[in-house]
Amino acid sequence: MNSMNKRYPILATKKNCTGCMACVDACPSGALCQFINDEGHYTFKLDKEICVNCLKCESTCPIVSKIDYGNNDLSTPVYAAWSCNKELRKKSSSGGAATAISEYILKQGGVVIGATLDGSNCRHISIESISDLPKLQGSKYMQSDACGAYKQTLQYLREGRRVLFIGTPCQVAAAINFVKNPKLSENLFSLDMVCGGVPSLFIRDRFISESGKKIKAIDSFRNKDKGWKSKGFTYQLKVVNDRNEIEVIHEKNLLLDGFVSELTNRYSCYDCQFVYINRKSDFTIADFWGDTFFRDEHKEGLSSLAVHTEKGKVLLAEIKNQNIKIKQTSWDKVLPYNFRYVYGHSLLKHLPQRKYLNWIFNHCLYETLCSFYAGDVTFKKPIGIVLKVMRKITIIINRKKSEKFIYNLLNK
Ligand SMILES: Cc1cc2nc3c(=O)[nH]c(=O)nc-3n(C[C@H](O)[C@H](O)[C@H](O)COP(=O)(O)OP(=O)(O)OC[C@H]3O[C@@H](n4cnc5c(N)ncnc54)[C@H](O)[C@@H]3O)c2cc1C
């Protein structure tokens, strides 16, 4: 670059940074590093002394580069889907569609890059063997640290391997942007999920240090032991205690109920820019809530699976009935029960619990946090009740807005 044109990169702001961390992977000089900001979310720091002004970070960032991630084309095929492997399906969060596709890629000698739990951290790893699949299975309701995953993806593609990259929509957009090279992209398969947003890591930290439980690691966030849907379904937190036993947390808790409340989400999640029916990823998975046609499958778990690309359609045809069962369905059966496929906005960002998150976490006792963010009703102070009512009203308005959006979309 001409030295006259030298400038520092203009990167995402606190309000729109997704924490995907692709900018850190893109930086050739080590000028960018990851850190956790004052609201408990991953973000980046730029050292201008080391920056070589290459602007690779800018062109990789899915926000700043304004990646065109999709559209709402209703002709995109969508299926009810479940894994043919009963054992694997049991450990998956819904029907195990992500795991069935992973299984096939691994059988073909490919690599799968996805999120695992490592102690109380969630981070992206690569796996090359089917015996490692359980490491990736199950939804971890916290942001995965994806630093290094994009470099690794590119490295495997350069070695001529097939890679399946699995992540939240912002992470998948980042991976696609990172690879860029169309020839290498031919071997890149990507799978994103319907994502309601990622919570602050502060809720995990305070839960572990102050809940009174002796927690060595997080085991899982969901439990299908009693089935997946209707009466059987539960979000259920399981932890590994100091005696190395799996302990089920039955009571309301800051980690899981704090995720469900969506009150500590990243700001970018309240205006997600990656929600579309038809996406740049090859596949999108979600829970198939609202289904009434495949009741026999509800006990074991049912995914909805959208297929966006020709490459995705070919792969699905190859694995159909071997790794995965699929039955075509339609968007009017999926969207009304899962608005986050297409509607990424939330007014929760305006509530005082969210706006003053940093102050509240610095000044309030654990029981107050449980009341403000996890709906614990044992805290009877008027402020707790007022905030709870405000949240309820906001959720009703959000629901109305999303219903209107979906109605217009399906009836246009
Ligand atoms: C933060 C978050 C929010 C979600 N919100 C919704 C929602 O609002 N509505 C809905 O229908 N579904 C949501 N999902 C998806 C849903 O929970 C299930 O992940 C999905 O239905 C599981 O499908 P499966 O059985 O095929 O996956 P499994 O076979 O269980 O595999 C899960 C896959 O997800 C990946 N994964 C798990 N946790 C993370 C993470 N934190 N970051 C990146 N990748 C991860 C793993 O790598 C794995 O490959 C969310 C998932 C996450 C992680």
Image (spheres, grey):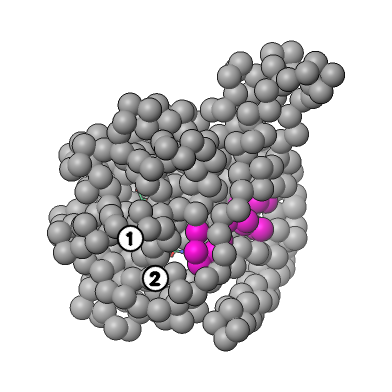
Q: Which residues are magenta?
A: 265-279
**Amino acid type of the residue tagged 1 in the rendering:** Lys
Q: Is residue 373 left or right of residue 84?
A: right
Quarter of the view holding residue 406: bottom right
In the depicted structure, whether residue 385 falls above or below residue 38: below
Quadrant showing the C terminus: bottom right
Residue at the spot 63% in from the left edge and 31% down from the top edge: 57
Nearer to the camera, 321 or 232: 321
Q: Amino acid at mark 2?
A: Pro
Q: Which residue is the site of mark 1?
A: 313
Residue 271 lies within the magenta run: yes
Q: Residue at x 61, y 63 (%)?
A: 344
Asked if residue 124 is positioned above or below residue 223 in the image, the reply reads: above
Query: Image quadrant for the N terminus?
Result: top right
- Quarter of the view holding residue 233: bottom left
Magenta span main SS: loop
Which x, y percent locates residue 363? 71, 42
- Of the pair 214 and 151, the residue shown nearer to us: 151
Give the alpha-carbon distance from disc 1 to disc 2, as whole Å.
Answer: 9 Å
Packing grade of label 2 (10 A; few <14, some 14-19, many >=20) is: some
Tell me what residue is drawn at x 67 percent, y 34 percent: 58
Callout 1–callout 2 Cβ contact below 8 Å: yes
* Mark 2, residue position: 77
In primary-sequence order, the first of circles 1 and 2 is: 2
